[in-house]
């Protein structure tokens, strides 16, 4: 009977406007979120394998003289001491380069691809927790297996350059990680082939990285013994990479900082796109919620005398709000369900090929979670607004 | 006060804020007044003396007064919405001067809306009450179509459809003839005695014909 009193002031037009706006906003948000999630899954979905925040890769600028002398500019012990003495410097670690021959081969579609390679190692503590925690970033001489971390750019170079022009199949990160590699090491008259695998991809760590343990072992066996040669690249841990003091020092010494790219190119585009889409959806959704809240305000205002009358009879604000809350929850639920269906329809346009390669799951988990969270949030907001406004009618 | 009955209503130096700067005489404003459950009170006043304000203060709908009102020794200014809802549901029955009926519901629906909170009377009992006050033929009409006198009787029946310790009636029979007035008074007396409750009724000239009533001048 309470509902009979209050529903007279319900504006169907306002509710319809809210439902439509909420549907559009939610559909766009859900599509953006699901697209982002699928794109992330399809591009490997892994965060960079190396270089946590606050670490810089520093090298000396390669000038003409270095080219003529035929050696890479390297850091002297004095250079390193000076770096370590800087107040902002938390630590300096060296890249160790391989001083033995490395060839890698991989069998792809019946063809054997072979290439000369180089390895570098850096202290394991500087590899990301993800790589270290995977249990694969280890090397045991008794059962030799070489885990390798490849720059993500190399894969992009292959996929967008080499594969596109050479009629080679493009490779996903997941796929390439499952391909067994063979690494042939030569030096000191020895030659040995070891199994290897790419266990991760790095951003901003511009080298082919292997564990320190492997490097020590291989250098001792195949190295020329002059690996004490001065390092050409350093990893410097700093308090704040953006600090002007760091930049000033590096410039004054003629050092170059290889900025660890925050992201790989393709991922950035996808993320930006998904971000923009979600942002637009979010804006529409906010407007929809504003419509609803305003129309609820108006509804309670128009029903003020009825609500006051009910309160005077002894009805609680909760009992009076119930019908209005159920109404707005119902409308929101309908709009959310419709938006979810809309997202599924949009997803069918991009999901086909990804699903075929089983890169993404068939159920849109991210979209479902986002829909549930938004539904709950809007419903809670509705309920709170209604309850507070109804309670506000207690005293005139 | 949970579940215990409301036995005492005390007014300590109470005066409505709009009258704070005016001189008041009488037995209610700026006095120490105690109202007991079980006693019938009639507050006689000229219009504008603040009798509807008093009812509104007692029901918690207005707080613009100076002084203190105590229910069972507790200051009502500390009561929250929940407390007031409980008082209105079980301890204080109220017939406001403006009646507070919903025009879009029938007379019966208006009464049942109140009765539904505590299921105090059966629908058959309520129909009997309509008959006793001579409006049984109006029970299923929309309240908006009834005369003021008929509405007053509907609102009176509604106020009796709950448990109460005090029944507050603000000019309940101002539009009724002597005959209807008497029937209303009989019903109020029976219902209040049945609950061992007090009655506070106001009047500007046509009082409810209660016997054994203590008269206070406002």
Image (cartoon, coloured by chain):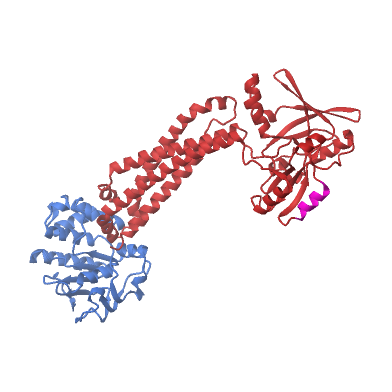
Res B121 visible: no
Residue name at image x 73 percent, y 53 percent = A90
Above or below, comparing residue B197 to residue A11 in the picture: below
Above or below, comparing residue A209 to residue B15 in the picture: above
Residue name at image x 80 percent, y 45 percent = A75
Quarter of the rendering occupied by the C terminus of chain A: bottom left
Res B129 visible: yes
Is residue A82 toward the left or the right of residue A388 in the image? right
Chain B: colour as depicted:
blue
- Residue A15, quarter of picture: top left
Position of residue B35 measured from the top left corner of the image (x, y, whole percent): 26, 76
Position of residue B112 measured from the top left corner of the image (x, y, whole percent): 24, 54
- Residue B28, quarter of picture: bottom left
Is residue B56 toward the left or the right of residue B182 in the image? right
Main SS of the magenta part reads: helix
Position of residue A338 measured from the top left corner of the image (x, y, whole percent): 40, 35
Number of labelled discs?
0
Return the residue found at the far right. A189
Return the residue found at the far top. A110
Q: Is residue A82 magenta?
A: yes
Which chain wears red? A
Residue name at image x 64 percent, y 30 percent = A156
In-front residue for pair B162/A163: A163
- Residue B181, quarter of picture: bottom left
Q: Is residue A142 magenta?
A: no
Above or below, comparing residue B4 to residue A123 in the picture: below
Position of residue A37 measured from the top left corner of the image (x, y, whole percent): 55, 36
Is residue A47 toward the left or the right of residue A193 in the image? left
In-front residue for pair A208/B43: A208
Is residue A193 toward the left or the right of residue A161 in the image? right
Q: Which residues are magenta?
A: A76-85
């Amino acid at each position: 009977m309470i509902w009979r009193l209050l529903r007279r002031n319900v504006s169907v037009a306002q509710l319809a406007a809210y439902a439509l706006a909420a549907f559009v906003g939610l559909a766009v948000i859900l599509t953006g979120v699901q697209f982002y999630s699928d794109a992330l899954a399809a591009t490997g979905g892994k965060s960079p394998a190396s270089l946590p925040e606050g670490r810089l890769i520093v090298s000396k600028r390669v000038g003409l003289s270095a080219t003529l002398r035929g050696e890479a500019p390297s850091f002297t012990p004095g250079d390193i001491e000076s770096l370590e003495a800087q107040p902002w410097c938390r630590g300096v670690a060296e890249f160790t380069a391989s001083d033995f021959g490395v060839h890698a081969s991989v069998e792809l579609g019946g063809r054997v691809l072979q290439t000369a390679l180089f390895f570098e190692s850096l202290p394991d503590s500087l590899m990301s927790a993800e790589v270290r925690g995977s249990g694969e970033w280890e090397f045991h001489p008794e059962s030799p297996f070489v885990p390798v971390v490849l720059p993500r750019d190399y894969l992009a170079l292959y996929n967008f350059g080499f594969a596109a022009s050479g009629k080679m199949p493009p490779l996903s990160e997941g796929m390439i990680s499952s391909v067994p590699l063979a690494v042939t090491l030569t030096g000191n008259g020895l030659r040995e082939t070891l199994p290897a695998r790419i266990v991760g991809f790095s951003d901003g760590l511009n080298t082919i990285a292997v564990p320190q343990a492997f490097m020590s072992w291989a250098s001792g066996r195949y190295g020329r013994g002059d690996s004490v040669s001065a390092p050409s690249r350093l990893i410097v841990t700093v308090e704040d990479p953006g600090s002007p003091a760091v930049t000033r020092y590096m410039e004054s010494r003629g050092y170059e900082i290889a900025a660890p790219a925050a992201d790989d190119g393709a991922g950035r585009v996808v993320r930006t796109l998904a971000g923009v889409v979600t942002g637009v959806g979010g804006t529409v959704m906010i407007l929809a919620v504003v419509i609803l809240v305003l129309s609820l305000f108006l509804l309670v205002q128009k029903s003020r005398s009825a609500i006051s009358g009910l309160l005077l009879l002894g009805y609680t604000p909760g009992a009076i709000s119930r019908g209005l809350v159920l109404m707005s929850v119902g409308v929101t639920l309908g709009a959310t369900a419709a938006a979810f269906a809309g997202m599924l329809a949009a997803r069918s346009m991009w999901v086909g090929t990804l699903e075929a390669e089983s890169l993404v799951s068939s159920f849109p988990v991210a979209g479902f979670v986002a829909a549930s969270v938004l539904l709950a949030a809007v419903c809670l907001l509705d309920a709170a607004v209604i309850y507070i406004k109804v309670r506000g009618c207690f005293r005139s | 006060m949970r579940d215990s009955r409301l036995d005492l209503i005390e007014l300590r130096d109470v005066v409505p804020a709009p009258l704070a700067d005016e001189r008041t005489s009488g037995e209610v404003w700026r006095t120490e007044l105690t109202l007991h459950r079980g006693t019938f009170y009639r507050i006689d006043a000229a219009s504008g003396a603040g009798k509807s304000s008093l009812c509104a203060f007692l029901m918690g709908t207005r707080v613009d007064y100076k002084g203190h009102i105590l229910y069972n020794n507790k200051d009502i200014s500390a009561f929250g919405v929940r407390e007031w809802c409980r008082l209105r549901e079980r301890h204080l029955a109220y017939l406001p001067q403006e009646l507070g009926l919903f025009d879009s519901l029938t007379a019966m629906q208006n009464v049942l809306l109140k009765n539904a909170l505590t299921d105090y009377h059966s629908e058959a009992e309520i129909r009997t009450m309509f008959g006793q006050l001579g409006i049984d033929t109006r029970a299923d009409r929309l309240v908006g179509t009834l005369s003021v006198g008929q509405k007053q009787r509907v609102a009176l029946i509604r106020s009796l459809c709950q448990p109460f310790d005090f029944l507050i009636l603000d000019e309940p029979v101002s539009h009724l003839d002597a005959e209807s007035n008497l029937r209303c008074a009989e019903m109020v007396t029976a219902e209040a005695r049945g609950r061992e409750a007090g009655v506070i009724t106001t009047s500007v000239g046509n009082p409810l014909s209660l016997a054994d009533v203590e008269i206070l001048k406002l």
